[in-house]
Image (cartoon, rainbow, N blue to C red):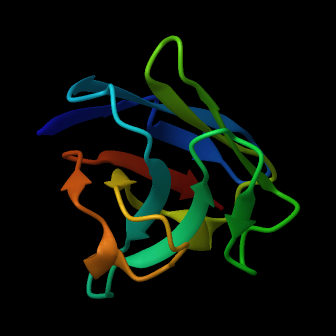
Amino acid sequence: QVQLVESGGGLVQAGGSLRLSCAASGRTDRSYAMGWFRQAPGKEREFVARISWSGGSTYYAESVKGRFTISRDNAKNTVYLQMNSLKPEDTAVYYCAVQAAVVATTNPNAYDYWGQGTQVTVSS
């Protein structure tokens, strides 16, 4: 079991920045990839970014590419999402998730553990 706790969400004006954090606890001795997803009201949960265990491989949704950066600090069991140039359409609850399998995927059903989410609201 892995427990995930997100933090860093809030209200920001368009063009601003936020940095989300996701702290993992429990079975953190295994090597696993981590991802960020988001869900806006009335919409399905969508993939945002993914990072491999080593941090050497990252992947982003087209909608955030060039604006968001995912990173991790395995010594702290923490993954980050730096969000710059935020837009109102980035407003959503952001979730981090753990993927134990090796094959990279953007499918949320392939992720094994989830945090409770943190709200990000971008005003215009």
Q: Nearer the viewer, residue 82 or 4?
A: 4
Residue 78: x and y, percent? Answer: 47, 25
- Which quarter of the image is occupied by the C terminus? bottom right
Q: Residue at x 74, y 55 (%)?
A: 57
> Left of 121 or right of it: where is 88?
right
> Left of 81 or right of it: where is 59?
right
Q: Is residue 78 above or below residue 83?
A: above
Residue at the extreme top of the image, as rendered? 75
* Circle count: 0
> Left of 9 or right of it: where is 114?
left
Q: Nearer the viewer, residue 59 or 94?
A: 59
- Quarter of the image where one finds residue 64: bottom right
Q: Residue at x 46, y 29 (%)?
A: 8
Q: Nearer the viewer, residue 2 or 101?
A: 101
Residue 62: x and y, percent? Answer: 75, 81
Q: Residue at x 50, y 74 (%)?
A: 47
- Which quarter of the image is occupied by the N terminus? top left
